Image: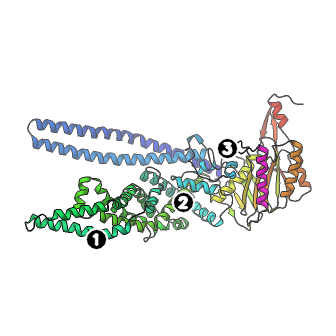
Amino acid sequence: MTTWEQSRALERNLDFTAQALARRIQPLQAASHRLALARLAILAGGSAAALFAALLDHATVAWIIFGGALGVFALFVALHRRLDRWLETLTLWRALKLDSLARLRLDWEALPPPRPLTLTENALARDLDLVGYRSLHQLADTTISRRGAQLLAEWLTQTRPDIDALRARQNITRELRTRARFRARFQLHYRLALKREFEGDNLLRWLETEFPSARLRRALPLAAALALTNLILFALWQFGALPPFFIASLAAYVAFYYWHQRALETALGAVTRVQAELDKFRALAQYLERASYRNAPQLARHCALFLNAATRPSAQLRRVNFVAGGVGLRSNPLLAILLNVILPWDFLFASLAERQRARVAQRLPEWVRVIHELDALIALGNFAALHPEATFPEIRADAAPVLRATALGHPLIPRAQRVCNDFEITALGQVDILTGSNMAGKSTFLKTIGVNFCLAYAGAPVLATQFHAQPFRLHTCLRVADSIADGFSYFYAEVKCLKALLEKLRASETLPLLFLVDEIFRGTNNRERLSGSRAYLQALFGARGAGLIATHDLELAQLANANPHARNLHFRDEVQAGRLVFDYILRAGPCPTTNALKIMALEGLPIE
């Protein structure tokens, strides 16, 4: 089966599953509506029947009817909740299928809008459409957490690779690509259990809360002694053995409590604020602990903290949740008074909270980090699964030639319109001069190379049948813009970008530079552009890097005749039936055609 057939089969499967789920959801929604009406009818009917029996002086019968109605009502409530949970599961499952279908079809209107990201100024991200609307990040971002989305963006916008991290992510992504059940259940369970984004920020802030631990540890024995004294003196007073001396001890206990009230509120309030977050995190941790990692050693290694009995979160968080439950009992003022009169309740649970917090503090940041990274890795796994034509690249220092890509394509172009090309850079110092007419595909090809390098550095597969390359630093000069705020003209901004390229090329770096430049010196007149471009290209030839320069200046193609480091490539066009036609196929040599006058003539403008 060809990759095109695989993609079509995947699309049909997603569409069929989404429609099948819609057919299952519709009767369940109707059943849920009927159950809601039945609950109301049972409660109202039972209450009316009980009231009627009470008016006839049949009190016992009235209570029996009302109790029976409440029992049946409770049963219907349980059934309704179970049905609604199943309905919510199917609805979310269908939403995941529709989301995958939209990503497969590049249906941007059906995709969630890009989430806010915090990235340093990165020309690469702007030039290659890596973030923002209709970007690579929006296409690949199936993450649930904000931190997961941020991590994914950071991986996709690297200008230089971390080879060890790249290979680790690539190995896990390769395993996740074929584990559709794990990916889907992670996302489904995440959304079902958490209902909203889990970030772990509240839990991490809880660990950072300044607990008055030493003060509370010293206060607990004395508070316990005072509480025990109260009980003994109260019991002796009840049996008539002593006068009500417990009043004095109780007053001392109350004064002691209020002396430590601020410290108690700090410790107990912090636990109360994170109780809901603890429940959410524990639900997700339990899923990762119980999931199957068979034939996925790299994924199992990444989730080792959730599989090791000594570091497993659920057992430790269960103890924290017990403490949070004990603290929650004091939310009722009367119960809080009663508990603290009988026992040093607040002192005891404040001490337990500090002890559990100290245990969790050692591992919680690492648990949260693993979940966020897994969230981003699953997004890469989803991207890989939705692109069966993609292959995992080999990035190694001894790659020869320094870059070889076969059937290289752009992921943001629909499959039906995508044209893939072979491309190779034989050695460092090579500069390819890419010529071609307007709209022939020069800029898109430059972005295709850059985007696939970014996918490779993130650990994702690239859109090619083969991709071998040395690790490069990346520099792009594709979308230069003027700046009113900084007082930069377009030409000056372009000059600064090209200067930065030369500085990076000449820097003492372990990695060579791959550069992509579109329409060099377009911000000046023809004579100066040609002169400046020739001099600039001479500085690039033979340097410790390689790259492509796209230009309309066919005169620059002559440089390849005199310099072995230069090579000409081009895209071409032709006029058919009164309209321009492009095949977007990369060819060797300088471009033999131009189309500016053709376009002007086709649009009715006067030409010589």
Is residue 5 visible in the rendered image? The answer is yes
Residue 238 position, x and y percent, is: 10, 64
Q: Marks 1 and 3: in contact by CB < 8 Å?
A: no
**SS of the residue at dot 2?**
helix
**Quadrant (top left, top right, bottom left, bottom right) of the C terminus:** top right
Classify 10 Å Cα crowding around label 2: few (below 14), some (14-19), many (20 and above). Answer: many
Residue 235 occupies which quadrant of the picture?
A: bottom left
Residue 488 position, x and y percent, is: 75, 45
Q: Amino acid at mark 2?
A: Glu
Magenta stretch: dominant secondary structure: helix
**Labels 3, 1: front one:** 1
| C-alpha span from label 1 to label 2 | 44 Å
Any magenta on residue 497? Answer: yes
Disc 3 target residue: 416
Is residue 585 visible in the rendered image? The answer is no
Disc 1 target residue: 221
Any magenta on residue 567? Answer: no
Q: Which residues are magenta?
A: 486-505
Checking the image for residue 325, the label placed there is: none
Q: Amino acid at mark 1?
A: Pro
| C-alpha span from label 2 to label 3 | 33 Å
